[in-house]
Image (tube, rainbow, N blue to C red):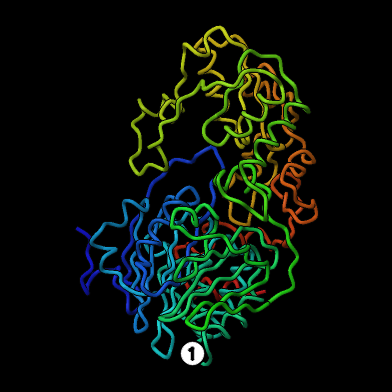
Amino acid sequence: MTDLSIDSKNLMAAAPSACSGHISDEPENEPREECGVFGVWAPGEDVAKLSYYGLYALQHRGQEAAGIAVGDGSQVLVFKDLGLVSQVFDEQTLGAMVGHVAVGHCRYSTTGSTTWENSQPIFRTTAAGTGVALGHNGNLVNTAQLATMARELGVSGGPATSDSDIVGALLAHGAADSTLEQAAMDLLPKLKGAFCLTFMDEHTLYAARDPHGVRPLSLGRLDRGWVVASETAAFDIVGASFVRDIEPGELLAIDADGVRTKRFAEPTPRGCVFEYVYLARPDSVIHGRSVNSARVDIGRRLARENPATGDLVIPVPESGTPAAIGFAQESGIPYGQGLMKNAYVGRTFIQPSQTIRQLGIRLKLNPLREVIRGKRLVVVDDSIVRGNTQRALVRMLREAGAVEVHVRISSPPVRWPCFYGIDFATRAELIATGIGVEEVCRSIGADTLGYISEEGMIAATNQAPEQLCTACFTGSYPVPLPEEDKLGKSLFELEVPVDVVAEAVARP
């Protein structure tokens, strides 16, 4: 039974208790996104359940923790925990969260480890006694600088160690002498990096997007209210209609007076191209382009750029499916399902035994032997990061009877880590760093290997090249990065007090 008592760490009318829980997790080979954010302002609607279903649609963006905050005009109630959305919430919990405004969040960590304190929404109380709840998708690159700012302002640090917590603390501090809206207008220009924010007090829903628009954020309309979400697929599940993308450098405020918009920075769009390749759901639309259509087009272009001779095109499900369909359409090679994916294997909290671990990829994927036996296969996947997954996959397909395995990748070689909200491997761990396509091909054991070109990938998005971030492929970062020691997931997780860390960061 879910605890909603006054002693529960989840019932927060004040700062949360120092309760923690850790998830030990094996590194995964595919890129992992940071978070999904959702917000709703809808008097007369069950905003907690709307947020729950919205987060369901965004679950792929973060599977470590989930949380919802609800405001009813007099207080803000926050419930969050480690786990999937369906594991964190039940009917009783959602039924106890009554109000007209809510924000929801599902998390994958890129700054700050996987603890209860770092799960979101972040909750802070202003000096005036009002509550502020905040959800953040993205990753800031000036977190150390912001920590110094917080120390100088006398903003106390808590047990949380994320960039999002610092933003929440500074936001609440600024709202002590002004409105939350004005505090946001003062703070947002000082944030550097990628951020899509949904935050709220007891009355009003706010949404903001960084000046580069690295991560997607959209506005939708309900019959009796408004919704904001990381992806438009969340609108479909809650019955909202798409209105528009929230512009880079824009702050929205939604309350009984309607929707207000303010510009806190001039837009310099550099949307993440990897959203089109892998991160977003295929049924989402980003900047006017259907993600599914973009991936199918990538597959067609991949077939033209890197043709293959084979009997069957198969995807690595689910991320490779649209591109594989496009490849089959363009090449004339039949499309087939050669791999079965276990739909219930996500980021498991139960570690496999050594025996199970040795089976490797079979926990997630298993071959359909009667389909692939004796066939020359063209296998389409979204990316190669370390190469471990593809190496195991090629071996598994050969053991199942494939006579040839030709691997085609619907993104260019990943050679650089992302600091804007995707948890790639370090540069030293990226297989494409320092070696060519032929060497990668030999490393994974494929007969041939082909990547789509950067030009082909960008063309499939229907976006202008100068308005996309391609840093993970090119090393060209649109937002300048600080020194290496001021970056990283564990920036504030040294075994010293938070204020000491902040003081050390402040020294030249």
**Height in image: 120 above or below 74?**
above
Local packing at callout 1 (Cα closer than 10 Å; few below 14, some 14-19, many 20+) is: some
Q: Residue at point 49% right, 80% down?
A: 255
The quarter of the displayed image where residue 193 is located? bottom right
Q: Is residue 497 visible?
A: no
As shown in the figure, which amino acid type bears the numbered disc 1? Ala
Q: Residue at point 27% right, 56% down?
A: 90
Compare residues 493 and 76 and report the one nearer the observer. 76
Q: Is residue 331 visible?
A: yes
Q: Quadrant of the C terminus?
A: bottom right
**Height in image: 29 above or below 242?**
above
Q: Position of residue 374 (x, y in %)?
A: 56, 6
Compare residues 235 and 114 and report the one nearer the observer. 235
Q: Is residue 410 left or right of residue 33?
A: right
Q: List the residue tagged with mark 1.
A: 176
Q: Position of residue 479 (x, y in %)?
A: 72, 62
Q: What SS does tag 1 mark?
A: loop
Q: Is residue 482 left or right of residue 41?
A: right
The quarter of the displayed image where residue 486 is located? bottom right
